[in-house]
Image (cartoon, rainbow, N blue to C red):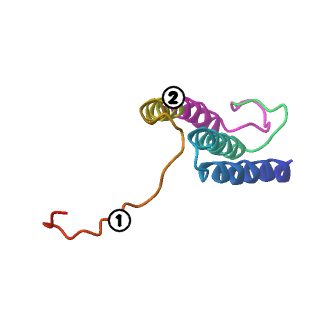
Amino acid sequence: MEALVASAVGVMTAAGIFLILRRRTFPVILGLSLLTYAVNVFLFATGRLALDAPPVLNKYEEVAYTDPLPQALVLTAIVISFGMTAVIVMISLSAYLSAKDDHIDMATHDNTDAPGEDA
């Protein structure tokens, strides 16, 4: 079970990084979402993968329990990632509407004229 979860986190992270390195805005948004899913699964897996275990301690008997802290962290991370995805979608939408293209231009501008010279 642990190997399956670890490989799923690795695949989602690799796919997210691959999509973030694209030159269009929509794959960048999908890549960021995949990275947040990978982090959420990783945080959830840190609370031990136990089947049919309660999330709280029982003081009367010794039973295996699931740590509730990673569950709370995942809930917080879901809310934060939803908000950040909404912000990035709005930024990319405004960039698309202003430039009429969703291509990310990383070209450098060469300024061969010396400062102070008029052409």
Rendering coords of residue 85 (x, y %):
54, 33
The tag earlier along the polypeptide, 2 or 1, is 2
In the depicted view, which residue is nearer to us: 98 or 32?
Answer: 98
Give me the disc on residue 15.
Answer: none
Residue 57's image quarter?
A: top right
Quarter occupied by the C terminus:
bottom left
Measured along the vertical axis of the image, is residue 58 above or below residue 34? above
In this rendering, the label closer to the viewer, 2 or 1: 1
How crowded is the residue under tag 1: few (<14 C-alpha within 10 Å), some, or many (20+)? few
Q: Residue furthest front?
A: 119
How crowded is the residue under tag 2: few (<14 C-alpha within 10 Å), some, or many (20+)? few
Q: As shown in the figure, which amino acid type bears the numbered disc 1?
A: Asp
Q: How many marks?
A: 2
Secondary structure beneath label 2 = helix
Residue on which the image places disc 2: 86
Q: As shown in the figure, which amino acid type bears the numbered disc 2?
A: Ala
Could you tell me how far apart the alpha carbons at marks 2 and 1 are, in whole angstroms?
35 Å
Rendering coords of residue 7 (x, y %):
80, 53
In the depicted view, which residue is nearer to us: 30 or 48?
Answer: 30
Q: Residue furthest left?
A: 116
For this view, does 101 lie left or right of residue 27?
left
Read off the magenta span: 56-83
Residue on which the image places disc 1: 110
In the depicted view, which residue is nearer to us: 12 or 114?
Answer: 114
The magenta stretch spans residue 73? yes
The magenta stretch spans residue 53? no
Rendering coords of residue 107 (x, y %):
45, 58
For this view, does 65 lie left or right of residue 79?
right
The residue depicted at 70 percent of the width and 42 percent of the height is: 41
The residue depicted at 77 percent of the width and 52 percent of the height is: 6
The residue depicted at 59 percent of the width and 30 percent of the height is: 75
Secondary structure beneath label 1 = loop
